[in-house]
Image: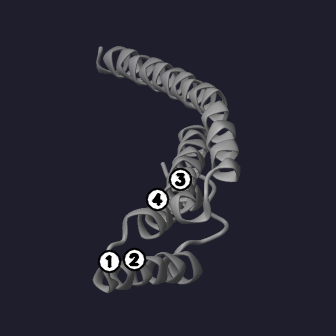
């Protein structure tokens, strides 16, 4: 009797895992679709940068970089949802920190914290992240 219940529980677990993977893939596809649709905004911002005077184009360029890096983080997140590797998680964190540093760092303390965070990521990748490990779970 106990084996019968364990078999049912294992079947339910497998079904939940499959359902979760399907949802993750659908979310990744949605993220990719939104990123593709957002490329139009980058083209518009690029055109505005070329037609704006130099002193005013700085803020527009900053918005362009912010938007571009946000799209890169979105793409990396989509890849992470599908691949489930520790390296992809580190890449998403790396791009998110780089975006934060480039876009909204207002003082040297922000930049210093960003550099420390990046150093921790690189140290983690070099010394703690094993290349042989294929999946995180």
Disc 1 and disc 4: Cα gap in Å? Answer: 14 Å
Compare residues 21 and 73 and report the one nearer the observer. 73
Label 1 residue SS: helix
Residue under the image location 63 percent in, 44 percent down: 48
Disc 4 and disc 3: Cα gap in Å? Answer: 20 Å
Compare residues 38 and 84 and report the one nearer the observer. 38
Q: Which numbered disc, 1 or 4, marks the residue closer to the eye?
A: 1
2 is higher (above) or lower (below) than 107: above
Of the two numbered discs 1 and 4 on the same chain, state the one appearing first in sequence.
4
Q: Quadrant of residue 131?
A: bottom right
Q: Which numbered disc, 1 or 3, marks the residue closer to the eye?
A: 3
* CB within 8 Å, label 1 to label 3: no
Of the two numbered discs 2 and 4 on the same chain, state the one appearing first in sequence.
4
Residue under the image location 62 percent in, 25 percent down: 33
Disc 1 and disc 3: Cα gap in Å? Answer: 22 Å
* CB within 8 Å, label 2 to label 1: yes
Label 3 residue SS: helix
Of the two numbered discs 3 and 2 on the same chain, state the one appearing first in sequence.
3
């Amino acid at each position: 009797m106990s084996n019968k219940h364990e078999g049912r529980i294992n079947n339910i677990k497998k079904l939940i895992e499959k359902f979760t993977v399907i949802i993750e893939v659908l979310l990744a596809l949605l993220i990719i679709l939104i990123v593709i649709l957002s490329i139009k905004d980058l083209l518009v911002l690029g055109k505005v940068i070329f037609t704006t005077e130099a002193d005013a184009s700085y803020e527009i360029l900053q918005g362009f970089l912010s938007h571009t890096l946000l799209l890169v983080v979105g793409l990396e997140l989509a890849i992470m949802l599908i691949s489930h590797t520790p390296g992809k998680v580190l890449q998403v964190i790396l791009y998110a920190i780089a975006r934060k540093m480039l876009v909204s760092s207002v003082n040297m303390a922000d930049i210093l914290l960003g550099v420390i965070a990046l150093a921790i990521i690189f140290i983690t990748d070099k010394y703690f992240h094993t290349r042989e490990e294929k999946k995180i779970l």
